[in-house]
Amino acid sequence: GPGEALLIEVTPPRCDYWNFQLNNHWMESLDYRYHTISLNHAQVRARSDGSVRLVVAHTDPGVPNWIETAGHSQGTMCFRWIRADAHPQPATRVVKLSELPA
């Protein structure tokens, strides 16, 4: 909701390509022309240990790897790993924007 963020944390596997994308409830891509609704391996800022934290929020919280909801409050999301050597399970949690870790 407004004032909240969904944190998604994962260590991506070794693979040729990966991306994360937000979709509507029919699994259609949100409006990528005007909103950052996806990130891939070349766009994210990874931590020194190789893990990645994605931040899904309605407004820009001023942290790396922000993904916009494009005005949607419901929908689906998807990780895609191409030729991956593993399929890690991302960890998720909802936090208040004011409590968002730096």
Image (cartoon, rainbow, N blue to C red):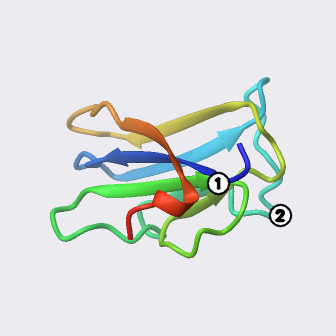
* Type of the residue with mark 1: Ala
Badge 1: how crowded within 10 Å, few (<14), some, or many (20+)? many
Label 2: few (<14), some (14–19) or many (≥20) C-alpha neighbours in 10 Å: few
Q: Position of residue 50 (x, y in %)?
A: 21, 61
Q: Position of residue 25 (x, y in %)?
A: 77, 25
Q: Residue furthest bottom?
A: 62
Question: What whole-number distance in Å separates the C-alpha atoms at marks 2 and 1?
Answer: 18 Å
Give the residue furthest to the front.
98
* Residue type at numbered disc 2: Arg
Q: Which residue is mark 1?
A: 57
Q: Residue furthest top?
A: 26
From the viewer's side, name the closer residue of 58 and 90: 58
Residue shown at 15% from the left, 63% from the top = 49
* Rendered-image quadrant of the C terminus: bottom left
Label 2 SS: loop
Name which quarter of the figure residue 33 lies in: bottom right
User: Vertically, is 3 above or below 78?
Assistant: below
Which residue, as the protein is rendered here, is positioned at the far left?
49
For mark 2, what is the residue?
Answer: 33
Give residue 1's position: percent from left, percent from top.
71, 42
Question: Which of the two discs, 2 and 1, labels the residue nearer the N terminus?
Answer: 2
The disc placed on residue 97 is none
To which quarter of the image does residue 53 belong? bottom left
Q: Position of residue 99 (x, y in %)?
A: 46, 58
How many numbered marks appear? 2
Q: Nearer the viewer, residue 63 or 29?
A: 63
Between 59 and 84, which is closer to the camera in this rendering?
59
Give the residue displayed 60% in from the left and 35% down from the top.
77
Q: Is residue 5 left or right of residue 71?
A: left
Query: In this picture, is 71 found above or below 24?
Result: below
